[in-house]
Image (cartoon, rainbow, N blue to C red):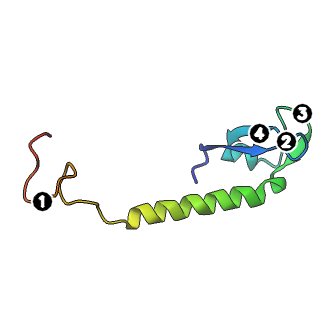
Amino acid sequence: MQAESKIALDCPYCGESIYQTVAWFKNSYFTCPACDKGLSANQFDAAINALEQAFDQNIEALLAEEPQSGGCCGSKKTDSCCGKH
């Protein structure tokens, strides 16, 4: 998962969604923007790890998929381009 990706996780204290980058949640200490209570990265480790694992599996699945059709524009024709490009 890219460090710049933004995700929303709920604050364990107030329940409000915190929408920040993955890197922000990996900081050792930070505060909830809604309730100002102190939070630490280990409170979100399990959720971050699950998201990163799901993201990586999705990327692997997308890279492993075969193209749906042979043509450059989605047509079944494979011997030449459709002429639209």
Quarter of the image with the C terminus is top left
Q: Which residue is mark 2?
A: 15
Q: Which residue is mark 1?
A: 78
- What residue appears at the point 37 percent right and 65 percent down from the top-left corner? 65
Give the secondary structure at mark 3: loop
Splitting the image into 4 quarters, where does residue 83 fall?
top left
Mark earlier in primary sequence (1, 3): 3
Looking at the rendered image, the disc whose residue lies closer to the viewer, 1 or 3, is: 1
Splitting the image into 4 quarters, where does residue 51 fall?
bottom right
Residue placed most toward the observer, 78 or 19: 78
Gap in angstroms between the C-alphas marked 4 and 2: 6 Å
Q: Is residue 55 left or right of residue 64?
A: right
Which amino acid, mark 4?
Ser
Mark earlier in primary sequence (2, 3): 2
Give the secondary structure at mark 1: loop
Gap in angstroms between the C-alphas marked 1 and 4: 48 Å
Mark 3: give few (<14), some (14-19) or many (20+) Cα within 10 Å.
few
Mark earlier in primary sequence (1, 4): 4
Give the secondary structure at mark 4: strand
Mark 2: give few (<14), some (14-19) or many (20+) Cα within 10 Å.
few
Q: Is residue 61 left or right of residue 78?
A: right
Mark 4: give few (<14), some (14-19) or many (20+) Cα within 10 Å.
some
Mark earlier in primary sequence (3, 4): 4
Mark earlier in primary sequence (2, 1): 2
Residue 81 coordinates in the image, percent (x, y):
10, 50
Q: Which residue is mark 3?
A: 35
Which amino acid, mark 3?
Cys
Q: Which residue is mark 4?
A: 17
Which amino acid, mark 2?
Gly
